[in-house]
Image (cartoon, rainbow, N blue to C red):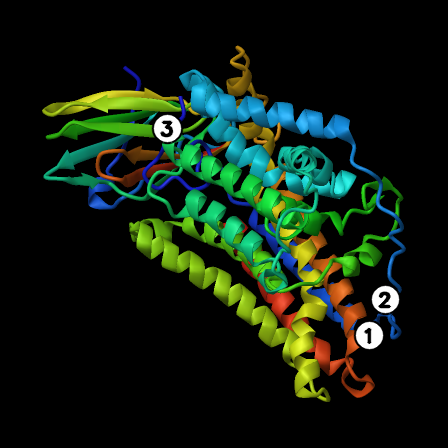
Amino acid sequence: MRARILVAIAAGVLLAGCGSSSGGAEEAAEPIVIEVSIADGTITPTNERVEVGVGQEVVAQVTSDAEDELHVHGEPEATWAVEAGMESEEFSYTPQIPGQIAIESHGLHATIVTLVVTP
Amino acid sequence: MLIAGPIATHGLGGQTDLPIPFPVAVIGGAWALTITFAVVAFAWRKPRFAEPLDIGRPPGVRSWLTLIGTVVTAWVYGALYLGSEQRQDGAVGFFYTWLWVSPVPLALLAGHVWRDLSPWRGAQRLIGRALGRPQGFLRYPSRLGYWPAAAGLFAFVWLELCSPDPGAVASVRWWLGGYAVLTLAGGVVFGPRWFNRADPFDVYSAVVARLSPLVVDRRWRPHNPLRGLPTLPLDRGLIAVVAVLLGSTAFDSFGASQEWQIRDMSTLGDTVALVVFVLVVGLAFVVAAMATGGVSRAQRRELPGDLVHTLVPIVVGYVFAHYLTYLVEKGQRAVIDLLSVDATPSFWLSERPMLVGTLKVAFVVGGHILAVLAAHDRALLTLPRAHRLTGQLAMMVLMVAYTFMGLYLLLSV
């Protein structure tokens, strides 16, 4: 297994952006892991910004007590079906084009994280 | 599949641009500021663009363009109401990209060709001829001026930025259905004047066309766009039209900012905020236009109307900065979906964020410079001799404020 950078957003500490910048789509960039938790109708994190390089994989580890649909507003778009009782279920997205990609919860009407994708 | 995000800006979901690079914004801002005050202090002292551009007899309608416009419109409406899911998404995409943004580049390049393209004008001509009433049944009430167009533009930006589900096919069906009925009925009842004053897209195109450097009234005639700009036909509500365009674009940038998103506004809250943006932009302009000495009350009331054309370059620059990648890239997607073909859009622009950032700043600053030159020239014409310099200061400061706000929003979201 490749080592992963854990983004401990729940504590408000953001360690993202380490693997980004130079190199762009090179294989070397390690995946960025975002822990998402949906509990009692609230979602954490919300409105975070995370820097990602083009071609760098983003993995969301989702723990949820409710059904939901997460939308990744990137090119291409992606939808992640979240089911009640999920424990650290992994969803993956690899941005291809520079820009900003919002990952939103459709059920709770909130932006979880915006990926700032730099070349 | 087009996904309606809960707080998707722009109506369409999908990726948005990176913020512009900070140094580019600073350089742009410095240029805007320097040139503005250089113009006030050192530029010409006698009006240069006051002489009205000879417009001549407008050419007749180009029916082949009306045919193209009608085919495209029929295709989009067909896709929206009868098409497959992909074609419906294509129609929604067309509505937010081509219909909303393309009048600006089109009018800059080719003048007010919307007049020829408009299927509604075409239908009105046919129906009017068939009923023996080519000029309609009633006189268009002159007190309405451009207000219906301002209301139509506001209805569009409201759907895009404030309504609960702007990306939904149903929302766009309601909007475009209502627009078709109103535009056609208005045209048949009031004649072609309805399109000149009340059709939001027709008016938008007509306003921007005055800045076209290549075309005068749909005829190829390269000229200084600063001479064409003052020919914008002034009427009631024109300031509202410009304020809606400028205020909504600013609100759109602002609405995408993190500070705004965490507030999670209701539709009503967003609507109030949009109205406030439009009002602030409009009122600030009126106040700045009136802020001069040495004029009578009646003259002072005329000043905002005398100056409103000078905001057009700012609107155009800002629209380009704001919607460039949106039109080019999401526009491709809309066409692909409408035709239901298997193709991938080119992301050539987005793959070059530095180029996009530089272009955005160049558009905003370029629009600003044209606006300042136009306002300076108009001030020389309308203000009393003793107040020619001081009388334009408030407007110049306001334009700098608009531009810095624009740059700040491009920088921060």
Q: From the viewer's side, name the closer residue of B123 and B393.
A: B123
Which residue does the numbered mark 3 point to in the structure image? Answer: B3
Q: From the viewer's side, name the closer residue of B191 and A56.
A: B191
Q: From the viewer's side, name the closer residue of A13 and B198.
A: B198
Do callouts 1 and 2 point to residues on the same chain?
Answer: yes
Q: Is residue B402 left or right of residue B113?
A: left
Mark 1 and mark 2 in contact? Answer it, CB < 8 Å: yes
Task: Kindly report the distance in space between the C-alpha atoms of the residues bearing marks 2 and 3.
Answer: 50 Å
Please say if A96 is above or below A109.
above
Q: Quadrant of the N terminus of chain A?
A: top left
x and y percentages locating residue B302 in the rendered image = 68, 76
User: Would you identify the image quadrant in which residue B281 lies?
Assistant: bottom right
Judging from the image, mark 2 belongs to the subunit labelled B
The earlier-in-sequence mark between 3 and 1 is 3
x and y percentages locating residue B99 in the rendered image = 58, 36
User: Would you identify the image quadrant in which residue B130 lies?
Assistant: top right
Which residue does the numbered mark 1 point to in the structure image? Answer: B381
- Mark 2: few/some/many CA within 10 Å (<14, 14-19, 20+): some
Q: Residue at x 45, y 29 (%)?
A: A53
Q: Which is in the foreground here, disc 3 or disc 1?
A: 1
Q: Residue at x 32, y 38 (%)?
A: B6
